[in-house]
Image (cartoon, rainbow, N blue to C red):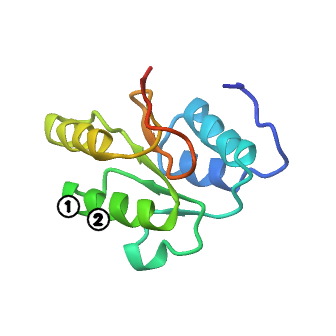
């Protein structure tokens, strides 16, 4: 993951830094948006607002029940789900592990965020 912004966009980066995410992690996610050619993102949006969104990001404001609903809806829509602070506490960690186990595509957990891709990638689990 590059340590500098790779594209001209920085809207996701700015929002994430504003929410208190470290600059390093915000850059990684902005670059992911660019690399995957995602155009839209949503942060802590309602499941009804997820349609047409390329990547949905959840903060600690989303409880476990809402995470399950978002994961299900993201899979249905083919949207990438990014869960910030997946190991924040035991309850959140257990919920995120359960989501990964049930997930049908590739997931990447680097402890700062968990990515659940819902595309053509095979089921693979990466814990960095």
Q: Which residue is mark 2?
A: 69
SS for dot 2: helix
Few, some or many residues within 10 Å of mark 1 (<14, 14–19, 20+): few
**Residue 25 point in image, percent of width and height:** 56, 34
CB under 8 Å between discs 2 and 1:
yes
In depth, the one of 91 and 104 nearer the eye is 104
Please determine whether, in this image, residue 40 is positioned above or below residue 48.
above
Residue 65, numbered label:
1
Please determine whether, in this image, residue 57 is positioned above or below residue 25.
below
Residue most toward the bottom?
48
Residue most toward the left?
91
The quadrant of the picture occupied by the N terminus is: top right
Q: Residue at x 55, y 51 (%)?
A: 119
Q: Residue at x 66, y 41 (%)?
A: 32
Real-space Cα separation, disc 2 to disc 1, in angstroms: 6 Å
Please determine whether, in this image, residue 65 is positioned above or below residue 120.
below
In depth, the one of 116 and 62 nearer the eye is 116
Residue most toward the right?
8
Does residue 30 appear left or right of residue 75 in this picture?
A: right
Number of marks in picture: 2
Q: Residue at x 64, y 47 (%)?
A: 13
């Amino acid at each position: 993951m590059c340590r500098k912004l790779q594209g001209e966009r920085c809207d996701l980066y700015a929002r994430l830094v504003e929410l208190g995410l470290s600059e390093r992690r915000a850059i990684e996610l902005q670059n992911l948006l660019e690399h995957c050619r995602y155009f839209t993102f949503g942060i802590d949006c309602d499941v009804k607002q997820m349609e047409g969104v390329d990547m949905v990001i959840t903060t600690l404001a989303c409880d476990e029940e809402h995470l399950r609903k978002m994961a299900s809806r993201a899979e249905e829509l083919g949207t990438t789900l990014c869960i910030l602070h997946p190991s924040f506490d035991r309850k959140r960690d257990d919920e995120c592990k359960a989501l990964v186990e049930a997930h049908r595509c590739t997931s990447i957990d680097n402890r700062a965020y968990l990515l659940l891709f819902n595309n053509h990638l095979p089921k693979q689990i990466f814990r960095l």
